[in-house]
Image (cartoon, rainbow, N blue to C red):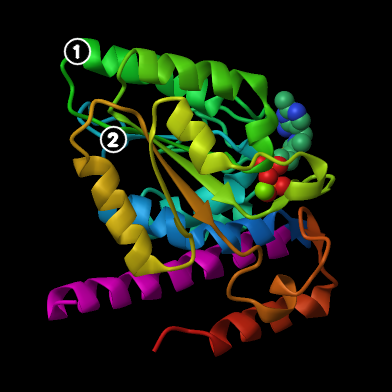
Amino acid sequence: MSEGNLLHNSRLAERAHRVRHNAITMAEVHGQGYVAQALGVADVLSVAYLHAMRIRPDQPEWEDRDRFLLSVGHYGIAHYAILTEAGYLPESELVTYGCDDSRLPMSGMASYTPGAEMSGGSIGLGLPMAVGMGLGLKRKKSSSFVYTLMGDGELAEGPTWEAAISASHYKLDNIIALVDFNKVQADGPSPTIMSTEPLVAKFEAFGFYVQRVDGNDLPALVKAFDNAREHPEPKPRIIICDTKMGCGVDFLEAREKNHFIRLEPDEWKRAYEALEARRPA
Ligand SMILES: Cc1ncc(C[n+]2csc(CCOP(=O)(O)OP(=O)(O)O)c2C)c(N)n1
Ligand SMILES: [Mg+2]
């Protein structure tokens, strides 16, 4: 790897660390939340926003921007953590998360937050909306990409697969779908509750250009996002990212029930300390 790439990756690691820190800051306000997902997906979001996407954080509505649709609305905390690191939101606003009149509602809402393009809450709608946006952008001759972040449990939602059929029918090579494959959903481990494997073969059969990567490996993610943008075939793209819930905070990684976490007041300090112990060199 060239020196320039090494430097880029180590800078990304530092910034992903700050994204995790932001997520803990928000979860601490309420003592609970979807913080394990935010820690797990922090590397994927960092590569999306800080490496791959064409954006102007000071102009969130810039016409030529890449779009990002947070299909998993309950990942609002993860989204605000990266939007802050990317420069859409001031760090001082993080402590308003989920409070009255905040621009950072618990579930992602398009009209509230700079940089949020869809209102979530009901899972299964990100890919359908990406198809509509992708078609619209093509008709306008735009070169923007539409990214959407889905969860692994979310893949059991029917509209996702209807949208997958349409995305390849319309040759929407401007869609880059992301799956946070953290192996957990609300009722327990995804493989036990509703297995979606073999997932690569399924999306390939639906006409996608598919990659599957370790979603906590920054260099692998950088390569996968580059491949997705540069792939020559007129197909929608998907990156299945295998992530670790709670990544970066050892006692949250080890926790069995981590879809929604409540910590005792003194445990937040422990979470910051655990994160700090893994601060990238
Ligand atoms: C249409 C719909 N059905 C059910 C829910 C309730 N729900 C919220 S999060 C979630 C789990 C989805 O699993 P996954 O996508 O893996 O998210 P994770 O558990 O990893 O946060 C469910 C079922 C919902 N929000 N919308
Ligand atoms: Mg999941």
- In the rendered image of this protein, does residue 259 appear above or below residue 130? below
| Residue 70 appears in the picture as rendered | no
Q: To which quarter of the image does residue 161 belong?
A: top right
Residue in the image at 58% along x and 36% along y: 108
177 vs 135: above or below: below
Q: Position of residue 97 (x, y in %)?
A: 63, 50
Residue under label 1: 140
Which stretch appears magenta? 1-29
Check disc 1 and give the amino acid type: Lys
- Of callouts 2 and 1, the N-terminal one: 2
Does residue 33 appear left or right of residue 169 in this picture?
right
Q: Is residue 34 visible?
A: yes
Residue 11 shown in magenta: yes
Horizontal and vertical percent for residue 77? 60, 51
Give the x, y percent position of residue 98.
68, 46
Residue at (48, 22) in percent of width and height? 164
Rendered-image quadrant of the N terminus: bottom left
**Helix, strand or loop for the magenta stretch, by majority:** helix
Secondary structure under tag 1 reads loop
Question: Which numbered marker is on residue 25?
Answer: none
Percent x, y for residue 171?
Answer: 30, 19
Please give the residue where the numbered disc 2 appears in the rendered image.
66
Q: Quadrant of the C terminus?
A: bottom left
